Structure formats: C-alpha cells, structure tokens
Image: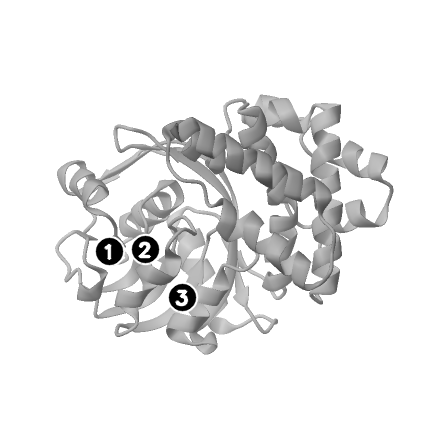
Amino acid sequence: MATHDPTAADFAILGAGAIGSILGAHLARAGHSVVMLVRERRAQQIRTDGVRIKGLVDISLAVPALTDASQLRRAGVLIVGMKTLGTAQALAPLRHANIEAAFSIQNGAFKNEPLIAAFGKERVLGSLADTSGELLPSGEVLFTRNVSLLIGELGGGLSARAESIAGAIDSAGVRSSAVPDIVSREWSKFTGWAGYMTMAVATRAVTWKYVTDPDAALLIARVVREVGVLARASGIELSDQSILPVATMCRGTESEAAAAVMKANENLKTVAPQHRVSSLQDFDAGRPLELDETIGYALQEAARHNVAMPVLETLYRLVRSLEKIAKK
C-alpha cells in the first residue's frame, strides 16, 4: 500500500492528528491509495513507524507522507483534518492540484469557507465527525469513539458523490453516511460543541464530569441557546440530530435545556470514562487552541447580526486568558 505514487492518491489527508490518522489508516488498510500531508515531525514518525492506531482497533501500516503539499498533483478526495489555525495558508499550495472533491472535518460553523476560496464551491462538501481519538506523544493514536462521519452537499440533498465517498469510508471501518442536510448538521454540532469546548478547557476535566454537573450543564445550555439565536439570524435551521438535542433546547426553557445536557450524557462515564474534548488535549499538550477561528469567529458574526452572546463571550475570554497564562 505504501508503494503508490504519493503525488496522486484516492484520498489525500491534510493533517495527521487523531482523526486524520484514523481515517488514513482505515482507508489504506481497505486498499485505497492514501497520502498524508503533514509537518516534518509527524512525517518522521509516520515514515519510521507507520500510522499506528490502538483502542477500538489495532492498525499499524506504512502510509506515504508529504511535507511539501505542493508536490501533490491529484487527489480524488481531499480531507482536511488539521486544526483550523492556518487552514487558508495550508490550502494555498494545493490550489494547483486536481482535487475532485474536498471536505473538512474541522470544528466550527465556518470551516468550509477556506475550502470554497481554494477550490470553488462546486468541489466542496460539508462534513462533521462524531469520531474521537487522541494523538499520543509516541505517535500512536488512541481510537476512542466511532459513531458517525456525515458528508453532504452544501446546497442540500443527497448526491452520488457524497454517497460514494461516505460509502468508501464506512466500508473501510469508520462509520460514515451521506445526509441531505449537512449545513444544518454542521451548525447543530457547533452549537453544542461551543459549550463543550469552552467548558472543557475551563474545568480541565474529562468530559463526563462537567456535562453531568448541574452548574456546568446550565452554562452549556445557555451557550447552546445563544448560538441558536445566531443560527436563526443566519438563516440556519438547527437539528436535534447532533451531540445534543439543540433544536429542542432552544425552544424550551433554560432549565429544560440544562436537564437535556445531563440526560444526553448520563451514560458517558460508563461508555467513555476517559474521553476528553480535543481542545483540552491541545491545552494540556501546550498546543495552540483553535479558539479565535471557531468561537471568536462566531462572536464576530454575532456582532454583525446584533446578537448578544454574553455567556459564550465570557467563556471565550476565560479560555483565552487561561491559554495566555499557561504560556507565561
């Protein structure tokens, strides 16, 4: 699998962190040609030891890695799995390549915009992942959660290409499906993730501890309801088919929304006791947070729409200060 031309591949994966590595390993094991577009340090790990996954599965195999993305000539599918920081700069060397389709599994409600700027809207699909892992210092990836990776057309509706890509990923072992309402799904995930991300760093606790605490759940619920107002102002209809039932949480009372957070996570201690949001993993490892590119961008959009988001802004400033303090 490692002998194919690394400048042309069925799947090119930009970023070999946890989810990028999980996807790359599964797709390569399934017989697809895969190339990882990564920084030098990660490339050395991959070249020396291969891509190694443990946890839900055990995979260890060689996958080609390029540190100069401009060497890529063609990719059937480009998957953007890097953190949102510097995405536009990372995509710039790929503008010349023949990219048939591209999607991002990054966080945030505005993550598709750099892809559209680089390749044109017709080649970009929406996507979101309820899939988790952690890149360990050894270079191994601990695969902890394999629920769903959704893919769909930005204009809505099902398409043959979305179903084909999702089918290939699903057959490779990472649960995936095509959906007709991906933009709503992306926003719905972000609506819940915004509270999870900020509370994860604020508490620095494994996920189950704060999502089942009444006070923390109330703060998450308030964030959901604030982002829900922004979604409506942006013409987005939220869905309950997300990490939280965000549409219902925005319609009911605040106390009902807080109860929904705790109910949605009541089994998390049992099924994923060590789960940590990726932002907390980054914080603990001293890696920069994608705070401004996700939460900060949402706050800018809220200001543009005259939407008040006092709880999210407070948590944003708290997390930003914690990040700066940690670096001193």
At label 2, which amino acid type do we have? Ile
What x and y, as percent, mark residue 245? 73, 45
Residue 105 at x, y percent in the picture = 46, 53
Task: Please tell me which of labels 3 and 1 falls first in the chain.
Answer: 1
> Which residue is the site of mark 1?
35
Left or right position of 319 against 91: right
- Tell me which residue sits at (13%, 38%) in the image: 48
Q: In this view, does 77 lie above or below 142?
A: below
Please name the amino acid that badge 3 sits on: Ala
Q: Do the residues labelled 3 and 1 touch (CB within 8 Å)?
A: no
Q: Mark 2 points at which residue?
A: 13
Sequence-first tag of 2 and 1: 2
Residue appearing at x 15%, y 59% in the figure:
4
Dot 3 crowding, Cα within 10 Å, few <14, some 14–19, many 20+: many
Callout 2 touching callout 1 (CB < 8 Å): yes
Residue underneath mark 3: 102
* Residue 323: numbered disc: none
Q: In x, y percent, where is residue 78?
A: 35, 62
Q: What element carries label 2?
A: strand
- For the point 69% across and 65% down, the residue is 234
User: Element under label 3?
Assistant: strand
Spatial CA distance of label 2 from label 1 is: 6 Å
Spatial CA distance of label 3 from label 1 is: 14 Å
Label 2 – label 3 distance at C-alpha: 10 Å
Give how far across and how far down residue 6 sits, in percent. 17, 60
